Image: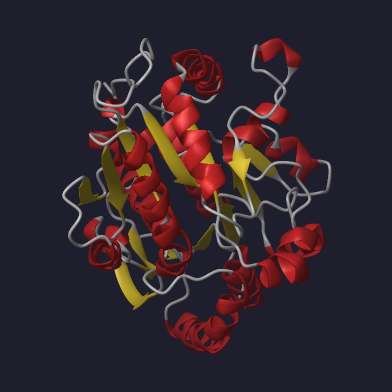
């Protein structure tokens, strides 16, 4: 009988990582059956999708409206396992959903591998009890996470960051900053990364557009490039209609970023993706004051929120990475848009500031830039199934 794997994801990035993992699993065992709940990337990789769980990904209080949907999925999956019990359940990211699936799978006698481990070191550390109870093994994507989990009684392995599996192997870096951009002079090209969820677009994109207008008031020839995701593309295009200075394409960051002089990025893995091309950036996230003060500020325990800053602050002194915040963060971005625009304009006017940040980003990325994360997770998965 062929081995069977069931994968659950809740958002675009997880869908992409699951697709890469599915391909790696099939290289190790072409007969393996892979199914689950996910999105279009998993389907394109040959995974049998039972329920689409990606396009409506949400955050903060809005995520509560998914509770009924998740409960229905759990009930359906439990019933499905009674007839089609897999050899392994793989949870990818999204602990708010996936820890429930881990509990369900273990109750059905199915071992659980958690890939892209919950960032409990940043918030909701109490969930470590659930991880210990319901997860057999954890595959970590950040170097410091392996020791974090092992010190708390969880079998964890650092596998590398899947982003570097998905980047072009011959990627080119952004141009070395050598000139100040001046009004009426050469044309700066600025990347805008507003988010991968529709809720993030509604929160961030209108304000990014105003920032772009303020930049254009100083640099009239400035051009902007935006890489979108399948759930957000139509909304981004609709909100930016009638702006010829905007180039908007779906899934185009790897094609666009080598030509960017600067970027304004929403916090998250996006910041590491931009850093992989050595693009200087500002990191923002639009959060309402009520939500921030009632929830986010109490849940988030790290001094920085941007992933590149977290990695720099947790780096060892031997690595050569500066143990300080590399990129400016404006989080929560719940006030005027003027400071973001002024900061971007200042970077464009001063190449030495862009060059210094670019150098720090190159040092940081060098410590993570290795391929094979998907293959290493696939090997762990096969090992777990062969142990049964």
Q: Where is residue 277 in the image (x, y as percent from the top left)?
A: 38, 26
Q: Position of residue 364 (x, y in %)?
A: 56, 22
Q: Is 109 in front, or is 101? A: 101
Determine whether, in the image, residue 384 is placed left or right of residue 303: left
- Residue at image point 26% right, 36% down: 220
Q: Quadrant of residue 148?
A: top right
- Residue at image point 44% right, 41% down: 264
Determine whether, in the image, residue 375 is placed left or right of residue 228: right
- Residue at image point 48% right, 65% down: 203
Determine whether, in the image, residue 17 is placed left or right of residue 49: right
Q: Position of residue 100 (x, y in %)?
A: 63, 74
Q: In which quarter of the image is residue 255?
A: top left
- Residue at image point 61% right, 60% down: 334
- Seen in the picture, residue 76 relative to 117 is either above or below; the reply is below
Q: Where is residue 293 in the image (x, y as percent from the top left)?
A: 76, 66
- Residue 377 appears in the figure: no
Q: Is 83 in front, or is 49? A: 49
């Amino acid at each position: 009988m062929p081995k069977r794997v069931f994968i659950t994801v809740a958002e675009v990035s997880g869908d992409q990582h699951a697709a890469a993992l599915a391909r790696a699993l099939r290289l190790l065992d072409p007969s393996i059956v892979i199914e689950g709940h996910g999105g279009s990337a998993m389907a394109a990789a040959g995974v049998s999708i039972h329920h689409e769980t990606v396009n409506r990904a949400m955050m903060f209080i809005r995520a509560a409206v998914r509770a009924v949907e998740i409960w229905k999925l759990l009930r359906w999956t439990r019933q499905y396992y009674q007839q089609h019990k897999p050899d392994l359940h793989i949870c990818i990211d999204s602990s708010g959903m996936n820890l429930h699936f881990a509990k369900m799978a273990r109750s059905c006698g199915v071992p659980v591998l958690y890939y892209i481990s919950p960032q409990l070191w940043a918030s909701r550390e109490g969930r470590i009890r659930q991880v210990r109870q319901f997860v057999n093994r954890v595959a970590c994507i950040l170097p410091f996470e392996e020791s974090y989990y092992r010190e708390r009684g969880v079998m964890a392995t650092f596998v590398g960051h899947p982003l570097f599996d998905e980047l072009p192997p011959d990627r080119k870096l952004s141009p070395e900053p050598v000139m100040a951009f001046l009004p009426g002079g050469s044309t700066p090209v600025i990347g805008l990364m507003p988010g991968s969820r529709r809720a993030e677009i509604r929160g961030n994109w209108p304000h990014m557009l105003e920032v772009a207008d303020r930049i254009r008031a100083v640099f009239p020839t400035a051009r902007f490039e935006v890489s979108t995701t399948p759930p957000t593309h139509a909304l981004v295009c609709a909100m930016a209609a009638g702006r010829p200075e905007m180039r908007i394409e779906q899934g185009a960051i790897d094609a666009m970023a080598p030509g960017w002089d600067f970027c304004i990025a929403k916090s998250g893995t996006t910041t590491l993706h931009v850093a992989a091309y050595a693009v200087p950036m500002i990191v923002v996230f639009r959060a309402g004051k009520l939500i921030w003060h009632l929830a986010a500020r109490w849940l988030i325990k790290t001094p920085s929120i941007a992933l590149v800053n977290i990695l720099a602050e947790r780096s060892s002194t031997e690595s050569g990475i500066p143990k300080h915040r590399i990129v400016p963060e404006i989080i929560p971005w719940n006030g005027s848009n003027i400071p973001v625009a002024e900061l971007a304009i200042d970077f464009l006017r001063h190449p030495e500031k862009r060059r210094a940040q670019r150098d720090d980003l190159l040092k940081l990325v060098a410590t993570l830039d290795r391929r094979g994360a998907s293959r290493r997770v696939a090997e762990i998965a096969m090992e777990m199934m062969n142990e049964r």
